[in-house]
């Protein structure tokens, strides 16, 4: 276990999270698959086990302080550290009706609920896990963002989601600055338009393409950039 990197993936019972767990486990990471729903999470773990991939499972709701605290205690007790944290858990609660998704009409509670998972969830997890990374002078944090959060290409509609991803990119920059000198790299990625429950069947990418950059960042050596935004392993604005 001492030579095996410990990776935590939030919201990992399906889609991008599940594919990322699969690929990291195949690369000999000890992966902790997390999910708010135990039934769905354990079903995903069972599927991986049937395919010869040994991963661990723990319940986790990134919108709950109590759940995050309980999960952190589990990691400390079982592994003593976390080497890779992937903040993948996310929601898209905006209406697909452009009028209702407008910043002029969106329900403020919808924005709050979106931020609680997409942004505050990543902050909660970072506050819990980064101290362990600092203790061991090693960490790789990967935040699943979106091109919809790019200020350089900001557009209308999907106001809650756009705001959350822009804020998540800010969290990435702040956290990268505050962990400098501890061999911790913090980066955001845009997976592109992926065929998931969120992306829909008309999306142009499969999940393996969507997680490729995250897999790459999880394996970065020392002295690589931090606080950046990537798509297809290339830095973007």
Image (spheres, rainbow, N blue to C red):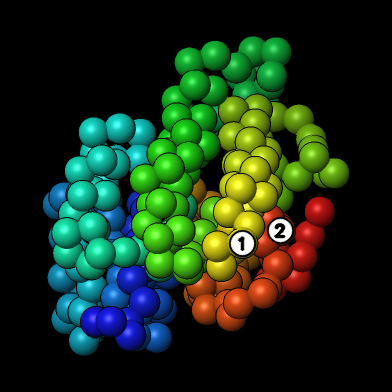
Count how many numbered circles sit on residues in the image.
2
Seen at 63% across and 24% down, the residue is 101
Q: Residue furthest right?
A: 152
Seen at 21% across and 79% down, the residue is 54
Seen at 16% across and 81% down, the residue is 50
Q: Is residue 133 left or right of residue 55?
A: right
Q: CA distance from mark 2 to mark 1?
A: 16 Å
Comes first in the chain, label 2 or label 1: 1
Location of residue 237 by image quarter: bottom right
Q: Position of residue 49 (x, y in %)?
A: 18, 78
Crowding at mark 1 (Cα within 10 Å: few <14, some 14-19, many 20+)? few
Answer above or below: position of 86 versus 113.
Answer: below
Query: Which residue in the structure is indicated by mark 2?
Result: 228
Q: Which mark is residue 41?
A: none
Q: Position of residue 90 (x, y in %)?
A: 46, 44
Q: Is residue 126 left or right of residue 199?
A: left
Answer above or below: position of 232 versus 73.
Answer: below
Query: Which residue in the structure is indicated by mark 1?
Result: 181
Seen at 80% across and 40% down, the residue is 151
Q: Position of residue 199 (x, y in %)?
A: 53, 52
Which SS class for mark 2? loop
């Amino acid at each position: 276990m001492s030579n095996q990197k410990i990776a935590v993936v939030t919201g990992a019972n399906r889609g991008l999270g599940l594919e990322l767990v699969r690929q990291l486990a195949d690369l000999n990471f000890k992966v902790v698959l997390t999910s708010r729903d135990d039934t769905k999470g354990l079903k995903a773990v069972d599927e991986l086990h049937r395919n010869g991939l040994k991963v661990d499972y723990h319940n986790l709701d990134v919108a709950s302080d109590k759940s995050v605290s309980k999960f952190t205690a589990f990691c400390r007790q079982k592994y003593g550290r976390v080497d890779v944290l992937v903040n993948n858990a996310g929601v898209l609660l905006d209406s697909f009706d452009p009028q209702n998704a407008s910043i002029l009409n969106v329900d403020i509670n919808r924005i709050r609920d979106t931020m609680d998972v997409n942004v505050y969830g990543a902050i909660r997890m970072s506050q819990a896990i980064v101290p362990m990374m600092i203790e061991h002078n090693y960490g790789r944090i990967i935040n699943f963002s979106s091109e919809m959060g790019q200020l350089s290409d900001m557009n209308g509609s999907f106001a809650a989601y756009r705001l959350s991803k822009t804020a998540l990119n800010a969290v990435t920059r702040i956290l990268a600055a505050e962990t400098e000198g501890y061999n911790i790299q913090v980066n955001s990625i845009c997976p592109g338009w992926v065929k998931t429950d969120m992306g829909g069947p008309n999306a142009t990418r499969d999940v393996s393409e969507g997680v490729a950059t995250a897999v790459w960042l999880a394996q970065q050596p020392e002295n690589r950039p931090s606080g950046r935004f990537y798509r297809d392993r290339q830095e973007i604005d």
